[in-house]
Image: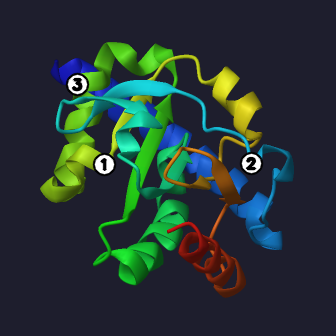
Amino acid sequence: MKAEQESFKRVTSEETEYSEKKAINKLEAGPEKIGKNIVGQPFPEITSKSLSGNVVTFPEAMGGKVTLICIAFVRSAQNMIDSWVEPFEREFRKDSRFAVYEIPMISKAWKVISRVIDSGMRGGIPVDKHDNVVTFYGDYSGYQKILGMEDTNLAYVFLLDPKGIIHWKGQGYALPETEKELFETAKTLV
């Protein structure tokens, strides 16, 4: 087990270093709203386990709430996700009609050490958020195509209405203008 952890740390460190360099180069232009062709489309079904160990299926798990779903493929994209989630939670935390989920998408090659990966995530994420972090291990290429997530070094955010229909999509880091647009769209969905 210790050898697996050391190997994971080494590979993760190398992947993160490469991804951070590549992401920094890609992000100099800032985030942009993309994928207008998916706005109005239903969010695809994704089933996996949350950090709390519950099997979760999207969009069914949303429970009729306006939901911000954040997807990332590399650990270095977490700051991008946080740039969307933190302001969204500040704005809507007290309103039970809103929810936030994070879906880390990890290649099926890492499934063999998924316990180690999930344990590391649980250690860095507050317990009250474990139900809302759903780690997907597998071939995510179909989701990339359907949702227009071409660059795996970026974070992607999707705002869904209570029926699971996509009303807004963003990528990279939130900026004041994209944050404002996200909030305005969210308020129209309740």
Q: Nearer the viewer, mark 1 or mark 3?
A: 1
Percent from the top left, x then y, of residue 128? 16, 57
The 10 Å Cα crowd at callout 1, few under 14, some 14 to 19, many 20 or more, is many
In this picture, residue 137 sits left or right of residue 174: left
Percent from the top left, x then y, of residue 138? 50, 17
Percent from the top left, x then y, of residue 172? 66, 62
Q: Nearer the viewer, mark 2 or mark 3?
A: 2
Q: Secondary structure at mark 3?
A: helix
Q: Secondary structure at mark 1?
A: helix
**Residue ID for mark 3:** 115
Residue type, mark 3 in image:
Arg
Placement of 1 over or under 15, stated as above or below: above
**Residue ID for mark 2:** 40
How is the rendered protein coloured?
rainbow
Marks 1 and 3, how far apart at CA: 17 Å
Marks 2 and 3, how far apart at CA: 36 Å
**Which is more N-terminal, label 1 or label 2?**
2
Residue type, mark 2 in image:
Gly
Residue type, mark 1 in image:
Asn
